[in-house]
Amino acid sequence: MARKLPRKDVVIIGLGWTGSILANDLTDEGLEVVAIERGPWRDTATDFAPKYAADELRYAVRLDLFLQPAQETFTLRHNESEEARPIRQFASFLPGTGVGGAGVHWNGQTWRFHPDDFVLKTHLTERYGAKFLPPNMTIQDWGVTYEDLEPHYDKFEYLCGTSGEAGNLRGTIQKTGNPFEGARSRDYPTPPQKLNYGPSLFATAARELGHQPFHQPSSNLSQPYTNPYGVTLGECTFCGYCERFGCGNYSKASAQTTILPVLMRKSNFEARTECEVMKINLDSTGKKATGVTYIDASGEEWEQPADLVLTCAFMLDNARLMMLSGIGKIYDPKTREGVIGKNFSYQTMSSVQMFFDDKIFNAFMASGAQGMCVDDFNGDNFDHAPHGFVGGGYLGMVQTNARPIETIYVPPGTPSWGAGWKKAAKVNYNSAIQLTGHGSSYSYDDVFLDLDPTYKDRFGRPLMRITFDLKENELKMSAFLTDRMAEFAKAMNPRQIAKLPRKGPYDVTQYQTTHVCGGVIMGTNPTTSAVNRYLQSWDVSNVFVVGASAFPQNAGYNPTDTVGALTYWASKAIREQYLKAPGPLVQA
C-alpha cells in the first residue's frame, strides 16, 4: 500500500533538459514543484571534475552514465511476424538516466529544424503529389510552425550559449552560415568554434564544388558566456570527450551547467532521485490526473498527489508510462487506430571514411560539435522527384574525437584483430578522417511501440516493445547521401575512400544515435495524435508530455534544439493559459 504524501502543485517525471526548464519556469510562478528522477544525482563539480582523467573504458564502452539493461530494457523485433527479444546490451541507442538525462552526455550539436519539417505532410503532398509518398508512410504535420517556435529556439540557444553563425537573419540570407535555415530573430549568442584541419579541408572542397559550408552550431562554447539565468559557462578546451561523457570544464551546455545551479536553490523546488514512477494516477472519471505513484531506492511505495503532471522522461519511457497509466488508446497497426505508440522513428546515419598519406589531422583535439557542414541535401532542399524517395540530411566533417578504443579507422580489407589490424591502426590513426551524413527517419504504419505480452521488468510491468526496421525510402536516401559525401571526399584527394551507406535490416548492435522519437506525437486531431499543439494530453488535460516523444517523424537533424524549443513553447502555454483556466487548451 502506497504511503500518501502532501500535495504539490506540480509533479515532474524526469529531471533532464525538459524537466529542469519546466521546473525553473513554474517555480518562478510561485508553484510548489517536485521532480522525481529514476537515476542518481549528478553534479559537474563532484561527478565530472577535470582533475580526474577521462576514462573511455568506463564511460564510452561500459556506458557508466547510461541506463543499464539490468535496471530497465526494451524488447525489439523487425516486424509483427517476429517474436520480440529483450535488448541485453544497449548499443544502437543509449538511453540516459540520472539528473540531467541524456543532456549530460550529448555532443552539443544544436540544430533548428527547417520550416518545412513542421508541415511535412502538407509540403511534400503539395510539391510531389500524394502518390509520390510510400503508401504506408504516416508522416504528419506537427500542429505548430517554425514561426511559432522561433522565439523558443532563440531562448534555448541563449540558455546554452550556443556557438554558431546565422545564415538567415530576419529573412536576409547571409554570406556565411546555413543559407537553408529558417529566419532567426538574432545571431547566435557566441561566435563559431575554432576549426581544426579536417573540417577546414572539407570546407575548402565544398566551396570548390559550389556549396556554402558553415560552422556546425555547437553548445560546446567558443568563449566564456553568462546565460540569462546568470550561470557562467567556460570555453571548450577540445579534449575530445563530449559524447558519452560529462563535461568537467563547464563548457558543454547541460542542465547542470545552465539551469540547475539556479533551480536547486529555490525553496519551492524539490528533487527526489533514484525513484521510479510506476504510473500516473487518475480519478474515477479517468479524465483527470491526481498525481503519481513511485517506488524509492529502498523499495518503499509512495503516492505523490499533484494538480499538474508533467512527463519529461526519455521518449520511450514517456510512451510506456502513458500506456501503463491508461491515458490514450494504444496504437493498433492492423486498424491504424489509437495514438499511443504511433509513429516511432529513429535516424538514418551513413559515412565515408578517407585515408591519406600526406596529411596529419590530430583528430583527438576535438569537441562534440566542432565541424563544417552543408545543408543542400537535407529535408526538401533539393528536388526529390528524380530520386524516388523523400527526406535527407546534413553532410559534413564533424570531428568529435579520436579516442583510441572507439575511433580508429582502418581501410577496407584490414583484419579485424591481430598484427595486421595493429599495423593498419598505427599507420592510419592520425591520417584518417570521416564524413558523416545525418539522415531523416520518417514514420510508417507498421513501425510502432506497444507493451510486450511476454517480458516484464523487475516491478512486474510489461516492457516496452519496439517494432522497427529500416524502410526502402530511408535506404535509398542513405545511398544518395553517401554518394554525395563521396564526391566531397574525392575533392579532398585522399589515398582511399570507403563508403558506408546504411544497410538493412536494422541492427541493434551498431550505434547510430540516441535520437529515437515519437510514440506520444503532437498534432491537431485527437484521432491521429496523442497530445495537442501545446503537448497537452487530449484525454487528460492536466497531463503534459514533453520531449522527442512528441515528434511525428524525425528530420535530418539532431533533435535537442527542437526539444528545447518545444519545452519553452509548452511552458509558455502552461503559465499564460493553463494556470489561469485549467482545462483543455485546444478543443477537440
Image (cartoon, rainbow, N blue to C red):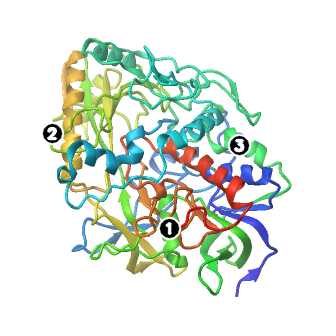
Q: Which residue is mark 2?
A: 387
Report crowding for label 1: few under 14, some 14 to 19, many 20 or more residues within 10 A (C-alpha): some
In this image, 561 relative to 2: left or right?
A: left
- Give amino acid for label 2: His
In this image, 175 relative to 209: left or right?
A: right
Residue at horizontal 13%, vertical 37%? 386
User: Is label 1 in a helix, a strand or a loop?
Assistant: loop
Disc 1 to disc 3, C-alpha distance: 28 Å
Residue at horizontal 47%, vertical 24%? 171
Asked whether 66 or 521 is in front, the reply is: 521
Outermost right residue: 267
Asked whether 466 or 405 is in front, the reply is: 466
Residue at horizontal 20%, vertical 59%? 135
- Give amino acid for label 3: Ile
Q: Which residue is mark 1?
A: 72
Q: Position of residue 394 (x, y in %)?
A: 34, 33
